[in-house]
Image: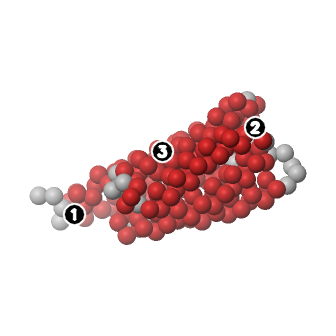
Amino acid sequence: MKTITDTKAPDRDWLKSYYYLRFAVAAIWVALAFTVAKAMPPLAAVMLVAYPAWDALANYLDASRSGGLGSNKSQMLNFVVSVVTAVAVAVTLPHGMHAVLQIFGVWAVLSGLFQLITGVRRWKSYGAQWAMILSGAQSGLAGAFMLSKAAGPAPVGIADIAPYAGFGAFYFLVSAVSLTISDARRRPKAVAA
């Protein structure tokens, strides 16, 4: 006989795996941005388009595990904004990094808002979403910082976006670890029941 904890386990397992995957991809992106991509503009260009495209794919995959984009409006909006951002970055790259940084700034504000909403919605079902909520709020602040930097005269590059991705990686790791700890604490209770 399955308990309620057993029927929710695949969803919780998916969410943990999803958060660990998001951490790994962001961490690799940041490492490349601070090293190889700084000296290789073609690689930096591909990475700048790939980052929001990956975010769109990740939101799509995550939403598909919990009823689809239609049932998860904040993830649907995040998916759409991320697709539009990837296209806008690709089109804007020839116009310089200040324009690209402006696009990333707007995207960070919007995607942060949608992530915050998703974290609040998931709190009831999964708990341990405080890091995702904080990440959403921090994303908005990072977006405002990118917009102000993009408006200034100082040279900008992929390394100016990397800290934003780095904080995202950190929050995904914290969320994954929080769910892992939460599940470890639940197991003895499920066995005892």
Question: In the image, what residue occupies the spot 73% across and 53% down?
Answer: 102
User: Percent from the top left, x then y, of residue 176?
Assistant: 45, 53
Q: Is residue 82 left or right of residue 161?
A: left
Q: In the shown orientation, is residue 63 left or right of residue 78?
A: left
Name the residue that disc number 1 marks.
4
Q: Residue furthest left?
A: 1
Q: Quadrant of the N terminus?
A: bottom left
For image coordinates 18% across by 61% down, the residue present is: 3
At a point 48% along the width and 45% down the height, the residue shown is 57
Quadrant of image for the C terminus: bottom left
Q: Gap in Å between the C-alphas at discs 3 and 2?
A: 25 Å
Dot 2 falls on a residue whose secondary structure is: helix
Q: Nearer the viewer, mark 1 or mark 2?
A: 2
- The Cα–Cα distance between marks 1 and 2, rounded to whole angstroms, is 54 Å
Side of 10 relative to 127 (left or right): left
Residue topped by disc 3: 57
Q: Name the residue that disc number 2 marks.
A: 94
- Judging depth in this view, the residue of 56 and 166 nearest the camera is 56
Q: Quick one: label 3 or label 1, which is nearer the N terminus? A: 1
Residue 5, how many percent across, how many down?
A: 25, 61
Q: Nearer the viewer, mark 3 or mark 2?
A: 2
Measure the alpha-carbon separation of dots 3 and 1. 30 Å
